Amino acid sequence: MLLIIFLVLLLLLAQVALPGRYLTAQVGNEAQMGPRDDLPEPSRELARSRRALGNLQETLPIFLVLAVLSIVLGEQGWLSLAGAALYFVARVAHAYCYMKGLVPWRSLSFLASLLGNVLLAVPLLPHIWS
């Protein structure tokens, strides 16, 4: 489980770096390092990378809480691991599909990541009543 958490965090770092890379490509190093007061409209790639990052940031806290709870509560069976792995693979696919504008694959990969969180949560349910 810990390995999957680290892989998801590496994905986060990659997605955090993308908007800066696209902004630098669009406006140059000097404007990127400046106060960014009068930037042009973002390029398609910059806008997509920002939206993809925002989308990851919406689901990441849920994943991290569920993954840490599964470790703390000793629920690292096949269902938890499958859910965490599905979340990671689906989030990678989501980022790729978002950047490439692949419809309906972006939405399907988002739904797959939500299913991964559900699979991660199922083994934790009995702990609510114990």
Image (tube, rainbow, N blue to C red):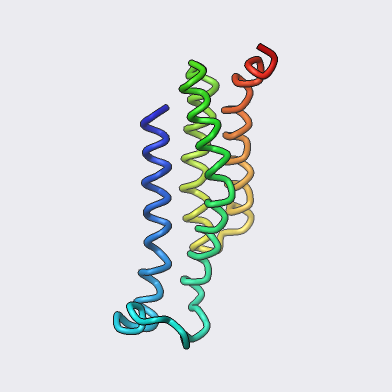
Q: Is residue 5 left or right of residue 82?
A: left
Q: In the orientation shown, which residue stands out farthest toward the left?
A: 29
Q: In the image, is 109 to the left or to the right of 10? A: right
Q: Residue at x 42, y 42 (%)?
A: 8
Q: In the picture provided, is 121 more to the left or to the right than 129? A: left
Q: Position of residue 12 (x, y in %)?
A: 42, 50
Q: Residue at x 55, y 31 (%)?
A: 66
- Report the residue at 40% width, 48% height from top: 11
Q: Position of residue 10 (x, y in %)?
A: 36, 46
Q: Residue at x 60, y 19 (%)?
A: 123
Question: Is 128 rendered above or below residue 35?
Answer: above
Please state if 106 lies on the left or on the right of 40 as rendered: right
In this view, the residue in front, 112 or 57, is 57
Which quadrant is home to the N terminus?
A: top left
In the rendering, at what x and y percent does residue 90 appear? 52, 43
Residue 4 or residue 45, whichever sits in front: 4
How many numbered discs? 0
Name the residue at the top extreme: 130
Name the image quarter holding the C terminus: top right
Is the residue 128 above or below the residue 19 in the image?
Answer: above
